[in-house]
Amino acid sequence: MLENYLPVVVFIFLGVAFGVGLTLIGWLLGPSKPNEEKNSQFECGFPAFEDSRMHFNVRYYLVAILFILFDLEVAFVFPWAVVQSGLGWFGFVVISVFLFLLVVGFIFEWKKGALEWE
Amino acid sequence: MTNNFSFEINSLLVALPEIFLLSSIVIVLIIDLFLTSKFRQATYYLTQLSLMVTGILSFNLIGHPETVIFSNSFILDNMASVFKVFITGSSMVAMVYTRHYLLQHSLYRGEYFVLVMLAVLGMMVMVSGYSMLTLYMGLEILSLSLYTLIAIARNRSIAVEAALKYFVLGAIASGLLLYGISMVYGISGSINISDISAFAHDPSINSRDTLILNFGLVFLVIGIAFKLGAVPFHMWVPDVYEGAPTSVTMFLSTVPKIAALAMLVRILVDGLGSMHDYWSDLFLALSLLSISVGSVVALMQTNIKRMLAYSTISHVGFIMLGFVTGVVSGYGAAIFYVLVYVLMSLAAFGVIIILNNKGYEADQISDYKGLSKNSPWFALVMLIVMLSMAGVPPFIGFYSKFSILQEVVSAGFITVAIIAVVFAVISAYYYLKIIKFMYFDESDKDETISAPMDIKLILSINGSLILVVGLFPDRLMNISMSLL
């Protein structure tokens, strides 16, 4: 029973070895010329430290929600694409219905003006 | 790789009402987008048409032999079809009042009707669900639509508060339900109701398995009790009823109860029926607490929507009492009770909606002072509803309470029946208080209430049904008893 878990153990060791190894190589071989900018936290182009209760445009919120909706769709389409050849026409029809319902949502948000920035 | 998915056109015919409703939702949503404001009413009529056709399709499937499709996760039997007819029918009635309310409070939006249809679709999936996953999916379609419906009055802070409370508490309850499902799945190895039933009925089941199954069962009962609004999981009910726009309150206090009852029957009776000894104790505690808290706390309310919320809680207590008996006739009495409750509740909220004037909610009990002089007909309907809810013969509410108590007594729970009757008598006080306000107090405002013809007609039919079915309850009782 326990030998079934051998791949997991191998995977853990490989993962640890890979992570430690790469860091070690970088530390041993890389040049080290630190300055203030390089040592500060990376924050996607924003200043690293400011008040967390800052104002931001409410439109980001809408875009984020719509993005998640259509991003999650891939989570369903991807497994379908992997086994698609085994599913045949049945799988094709099912995924078409699913995508059609998403398109209806897309038409709705477009027509309602959720995609307009101004 | 072999093809495991057999695609049979027959299995689609079994799910025809759901497929039709989903297609209508898509069509109505798109049509509503392109309507000019002149044709805004079209959305309402299309919604009513879709619901009616869905109801007729479900009606035609009554008597269809029991069929399980979609890899054992969707069942069509008489209970499912009959419940679907009642769900679509009562949603249509609720929609008639809803349009009036929405127009008066300038909340009329096409999305409202689409969301209601989505909620109905969720309930139909719940009623037909034969695996834990299908039941849960239906429940979530229903709940997410209801959260949004409550928040549709987004300028009213009390409505937004109600929506948020309902959402947070509903999410916790869904989490508990899922946890229970995962425990049951973990020990039985299946999410199909029939497989779980076979596992639980197996006489060679060992005590460790029973213990874990019982552990999952507790969470399942909590999840269901929350959705029904039974004490001590009732905290959301009064706040949501009060905060939501009255048309939404009407919808969410009536139709989802049918679906929740169906889910209860599927999981606890069909699936874990052999565990009845374990869950009936939980139900006994839940129902006695609901009846007592619902009856006593309602006495103090000044807001009629809050009062009806507590009255719902006490009705839910009676419904759950039917499941304590552990006999099929007891379950049938509970189904009868829930159908009767929907009928009475629709009429009660109907009167409240009619008394709304432009932008003004008639939700204080004192608003009903002297109603019999201003509008005697509406007062009479309210009188019938209140007497029926209090359980006075010959109205239908008497028979629903009577049949539950009869089953409880014949199952040997005499003390329980006495306690229930005592609290039913206490609860009669607040129903009679409204009647006293309507008939024996002077009104402080002097205006006649007018309402469109369609509402008057529906309300009159609804009110007289409470009396007529009360005089001849056999037919509805036979239907309820035959479903299990």
Image (cartoon, rainbow, N blue to C red):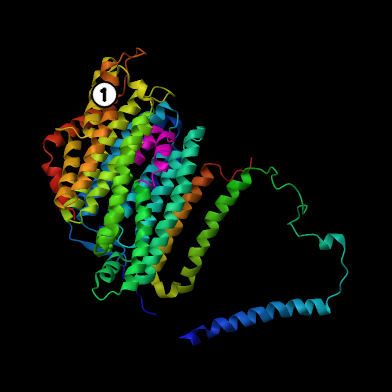
The residue under the point 47% across, 43% down is B165
Q: Is residue B363 visible?
A: yes
Q: Is residue A114 left or right of residue A101?
A: right
| B265 or B34: nearer the viewer | B265
Q: Position of residue A114 (x, y in %)?
A: 56, 44
| B344 or A64: nearer the viewer | B344
Number of numbered discs visible in the structure rendering: 1
Q: Position of residue B270 (x, y in %)?
A: 25, 61
Query: Furthest residue to the bottom?
Result: A3
Q: Is residue B394 left or right of residue B90?
A: left
Question: Looking at the rendering, in which quadrant would you find the N terminus of chain B?
Answer: bottom left
Q: Is residue B23 visible?
A: no
Magenta run includes residue B237? yes
What span is colored magenta in the figure? B231-253
Q: Position of residue B314 (x, y in %)?
A: 30, 40
Q: Main secondary structure of the magenta part?
A: helix
The residue under the point 55% across, 81% down is A8
Magenta run includes residue B248? yes
Task: Characterize the local packing of mark 1: few (<14), some (14-19) or many (20 or more) Cα atoms within 10 angstroms.
Answer: many
The residue under the point 33% across, 21% down is B368
Q: Amino acid at mark 1?
A: Ile
Which residue lies under the disc numbered 1? Answer: B435
